[in-house]
Amino acid sequence: MNPDPIVRITAGQIRGFWRGPAGAPGSSAAFLGIPFAEAPVGALRFAAPVPVAPWDGIRDAREYGATAKRAKPGEKTLIPEPAVPGEATLNVNVFTPTPGGDAALPVLVYIHGGGFTEGSPASPWYDGKAFTRDGVVTVTISYRLGFDGFGHIPGAPSNRGVRDWLAALAWVQENIAAFGGDPGHVTIAGQSAGGGAVLTLLGMPAAQGLFHAAWALSPALGDVSGERARTLTAKLAGLLGVDPSRDGFAGVTEADILAQQESVGRTGQSPLDVARGMLQDGLSFGPMIDGDLLARPTIEALRSGLGGDVPLVLGATDDEFTMITDGAARVLGLVPPGVALQQLDVPRERRHAWLAANAPQRRKGTAAVVGRYVGDVIFRSTVLRAADARAAAGGAAKTWAYRFTWPSPTIGWACHCLDVPFWFDALGAEAVGAIAGDAPSQALADAVHGAAVALIRDGDPGWPAWDPATQPTRVFDLPADGRAPVVFDGYASVRALA
């Protein structure tokens, strides 16, 4: 029987567990729920993360730590992301084939998504088995969510969730060598809000030097303006009946805030109302332009050259949010596509240009048009704008773009989150079948995951780098569809939104 692996980090010794025989091909060790900061409760609730106090003896790290995500009865999400109760929510999970060794393997740090209000690093999809099999030490991190993590609170440090990312990355720099990782060879990655986190960190002065490559899957940026953040704070305080200050919110339980925070940014219930709110206002909570950590919007920061020495891969699925408007297909079918976009307050010139570039989508009906448009604004145009901004900055590192175009056999679209189990090569994980069907293509997983490993190991995913004039774009789909692996003008259909 293999003894449990024990490593020493800056705060003390921790005990993990082996998955498979120690040292056998494909086996790895897991260390779960390692605190990188003190529990953000009491006086630390709205504070910047504080390094965890050292401990004596050997601390068990064999179960996932508490998550900032809290359980909701009956909740179903596309990605299974468990809510683990507890207060010590600032922790990391490490998966490694060489604990305690000096292998200096490349490192992946993954930031989960969830709109900056949900999500969990304890998902079985983020387990890291395939990456450790391929010689990559894998880390998943937690961070404070919603109002506690990102809300504007007078008297409290801004962007507390962002500060959690920075603290977790600093922990990796200090400790990953104990797990056989190379602190000088760290790639950050994330999907949706996690992909937005990747771009935010890339364009943040305080994060420079904490990582050396980046991959953003379906990046959704926060970039919440100070004015919107203050408005939401005042509205939330009114709903809770407290003073909009640190002392006022400190007197309200986490549960009470969670019960009210979802309503503060809501602008209506109909499909068009929800879409209009997302397009006009963006996310309610997320990284805020605070003049401190984030002095300017992320795309502007990238255009200025920040992060220009870090190789970046970014892309999106073709129909991120179209599944959401499917339920309104009958109602929206009575409305011409142009009129529907007009009702979303899309300016005439932009509306006409985008519709002209998306004729194939128009033939699928107005619900498909509205869903594609919302996904294009939030996700796919961000890919284009970020790639173009980095090209304009002329940095030393390359940028690569991709599209994930394979449609889900259960949902019918190349939808949001569909690419994640392929990226992790986790097709056998819990609940993958609900989004990818009973027989998802291993060949497609090999292609997507292989590109990720190539970036992490070698700094190059394996296709031509971005050029704004030709827009070379890797297309991830089944080989039988007859498409070339790389197309040009790959994001031409969203150029009107850039």
Image (spheres, grey):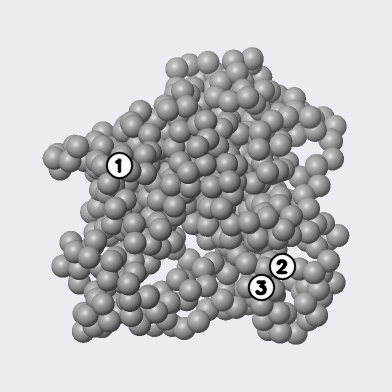
User: 198 above or below 457?
Assistant: below
Q: Position of residue 7 (x, y in %)?
A: 70, 24
Q: CA distance from mark 3 to mark 2?
A: 10 Å
Q: Secondary structure at mark 1?
A: loop
Q: Position of residue 36 (x, y in %)?
A: 73, 41
**Image side of residue 385 versus residue 474, left or right:** right
Q: Indicate the amino acid at tag 3.
A: Glu
- Looking at the image, can residue 132 be seen? no
**Image side of residue 291 versus residue 217, left or right:** right
Q: Indicate the amino acid at tag 2.
A: His
At a point 69% along the width and 49% down the height, the residue shown is 164
User: 193 above or below 356?
Assistant: above
Q: Earlier in the sequence, mark 2 or mark 1?
A: 2
- The dot on residue 252 is none
Q: Earlier in the sequence, mark 3 or mark 2?
A: 2
Q: CA distance from mark 3 to mark 1?
A: 38 Å
User: 240 above or below 435?
Assistant: below
Query: Badge 3 is on which residue?
Result: 227
Q: Nearer the viewer, mark 2 or mark 1?
A: 1
At a point 37% along the width and 75% down the height, the residue shown is 346
Q: Secondary structure at mark 2?
A: loop
* Neighbours of disc 2 within 10 Å: few (<14), some (14-19), many (20+): many
Query: Badge 2 is on which residue?
Result: 152
Q: Indicate the amino acid at tag 1.
A: Thr
Query: Badge 1 is on which residue?
Result: 470
* Neighbours of disc 3 within 10 Å: few (<14), some (14-19), many (20+): few
Q: Secondary structure at mark 3?
A: helix
At a point 81% along the width and 73% down the height, the residue shown is 245
Q: CA distance from mark 2 to mark 1?
A: 41 Å
Q: Nearer the viewer, mark 3 or mark 1?
A: 1
Q: Position of residue 357 (x, y in %)?
A: 24, 61
